[in-house]
Image: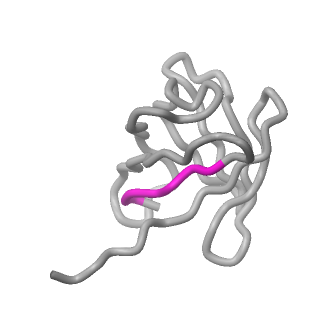
Amino acid sequence: MAGRWILAAPGAPSCGMNFAGAPGARDGNVAPEGGCPGKFFMSRRWIFEQDTLLINDEENNPLAQLNSAGGRFEGQSTTGISVTLTRQAVTAN
């Protein structure tokens, strides 16, 4: 899960979200970059349980629930916004 992911929502600009955690960890921290849609700028924690990714704010209030969908995550924010989360490809220099 650790690494840079791109959060996208219909009608909104996409934003980068940096997920941190030890290899194989089931939870960790999130550092959103600027311009995230909805309340995703408040993302601070992630938890992965049974193919479901939960993104929470600093006070551990849920912001979104996303399901694993073939190498990416799809779901909704708690305010009803449809979102996708895709790992950013690493390019070699």
Q: Is residue 65 left or right of residue 3?
A: right
In the image shown, does 72 or 2 lie closer to the viewer?
Answer: 72
| Location of residue 25 (image quadrant) | bottom left
Q: Residue furthest top?
A: 59
Type of colouring:
one colour
The residue range painted magenta reads 2-8
How many marks on residues? 0
Magenta segment: does it hold 42? no
Q: Horizontal and vertical percent for residue 44?
A: 46, 31
Q: Position of residue 39 (x, y in %)?
A: 61, 25
**What is the quadrant of residue 55 in the picture?**
top right
Q: Residue 69 location, x and y as percent?
A: 73, 70
Q: Residue at x 50, y 55 (%)?
A: 6
Q: Nearer the viewer, residue 20 or 38?
A: 38
Residue found at the very far bottom of the displayed protein: 92
Residue under the image location 65 percent in, 43 percent down: 54
Kindly identify the residue that appears in the image at 28 percent across and 79 percent down.
Answer: 91
Judged from this view, the residue extending furthest toward the right is 80
The C terminus, quarter of image = bottom left
Establish if 87 lies above or below 17: below
Considering the whole magenta stretch, tell me its main secondary structure. strand
Q: Nearer the viewer, residue 60 or 88?
A: 88
Above or below residue 56? Residue 87 is: below
Q: Nearer the viewer, residue 52 or 17?
A: 17
Q: Position of residue 76 (x, y in %)?
A: 78, 43
Q: Is residue 13 above or below residue 48?
A: above
Up-down: is 91 above or below 63? Answer: below
> Going 47% across and 61% down the picture, which residue do you hit?
1
